[in-house]
Structure formats: C-alpha cells, structure tokens
Amino acid sequence: MKIKIQKNKLKKITMKKQLLSIALGLVAMFTVSTSFAADAKQYKSSEGTITVDGNKTTVLNQKGKWVYTIHRFTADNLPKDVLNIVKNDYDQYYVSGMEKVDQRGLSPYYIVHLEGVKTIKTVKVNMNDGETELVQDFVKG
C-alpha cells in the first residue's frame, strides 16, 4: 500500500515537471515568434490547439477543453506582488520578464526570468505560499 502511494506521488511530480517543461518551451518559442503581435494565430495538431493572441497563449486538448493559459509580462508591466517575492530571494538580479501559468486543476504560478552579472536564472513562484523555486540556472559565457 505504501509503495502504491509513493508511486502515485512520483507520477504527479513527474507530470508537473513535464507540464512545466512544456510550458517553458512554448513560452520561449511563442515569445520569440509572436513578439506580442496584435493578430491571433492558431496552431492545430493531433494533440490539440494552441492559440497565441498578443501576450496570451491558450492550449486546448484534442476535445477542445482548456488545458492551460500562459500570460506573458514585459519588464515594464510586471505584477508588483510577484516582483516583491522574487526580490526577497534574488535582490541582486534584474527581472527581464515573467509569465503567469493558469492550469486546470492547479493554482496559478509565475515563471520569472532573472539576469545577474554572471548568471541567468529562471524561477517558479508559488503565490499560495510565497515561495520561489529555482528551475534553471545558466552561467554566462
């Protein structure tokens, strides 16, 4: 019984990490390709539909049900409450942008992009508990 519970927890953690990876990949891809364009663009595949409309990307599954939405923020319109949480842990870093991820069945969270003198970091912010989690850490070359 204990092993089954641990396997279920591991599956949930793995799924969350996979969804976070997908979200980060989509954000990077669509931020570069859309440049906050005014016209909505829609991409369809056998797995679902992705709609990019300005600073918002929405993903629907193959049945047309909402899966998640990513809202992108530029450096000049960052939510102040998220910025304050990040600055508590990373006050030596410049915040270059962030995304808010709304996902079915989960609380919204923010992905924040930070740049320092020697490193570039990506941080996940959980607004429920005000905690930050380091997702990526790159050394500038």
Image (cartoon, helix red, strand yellow):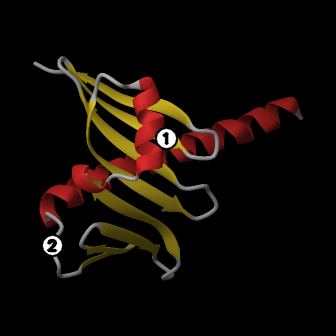
Q: Is residue 24 above or below residue 85?
A: below
- The foreground one among 10 and 103 is 103
Name the quadrant of the N terminus.
Answer: top right
Density class for disc 1 (Cα within 10 Å; few <14, some 14-19, many ≥20) is many
Density class for disc 2 (Cα within 10 Å; few <14, some 14-19, many ≥20) is few
Residue 74 in percent (x, y) is at 24, 54
- The foreground one among 53 and 21 is 53
- The foreground one among 44 and 55 is 55
Residue 7's mark?
none
Tell me which corner region of the image, top left, top right, bottom left or bottom right, holds residue 34: bottom left
Cα distance between the residues tagged 1 and 2:
27 Å
Number of labelled discs?
2
Residue that numbered label 1 is attached to: 125
Q: Name which residue type carries label 2.
A: Ala
Residue 58 in percent (x, y) is at 39, 71
Name the quadrant of the C terminus.
Answer: top left
Q: Is residue 77 above or below residue 93?
A: below
Look at 47% across and 47% down and name the residue there: 81
Q: Is residue 70 left or right of residue 65?
A: left
Q: Is residue 16 left or right of residue 22?
A: right
Residue that numbered label 2 is attached to: 37
Secondary structure at badge 1 equals: strand
Secondary structure at badge 2 equals: loop
Q: Name which residue type carries label 1.
A: Val
Look at 28% across and 33% down and name the residue there: 114
Farthest-out residue, left:
141
- Going from the N terminus, do you reach mark 1 or mark 2 first? 2
Look at 71% across and 38% down and name the residue there: 9
Q: Is residue 83 visible?
A: yes
Residue 77 in percent (x, y) is at 29, 56
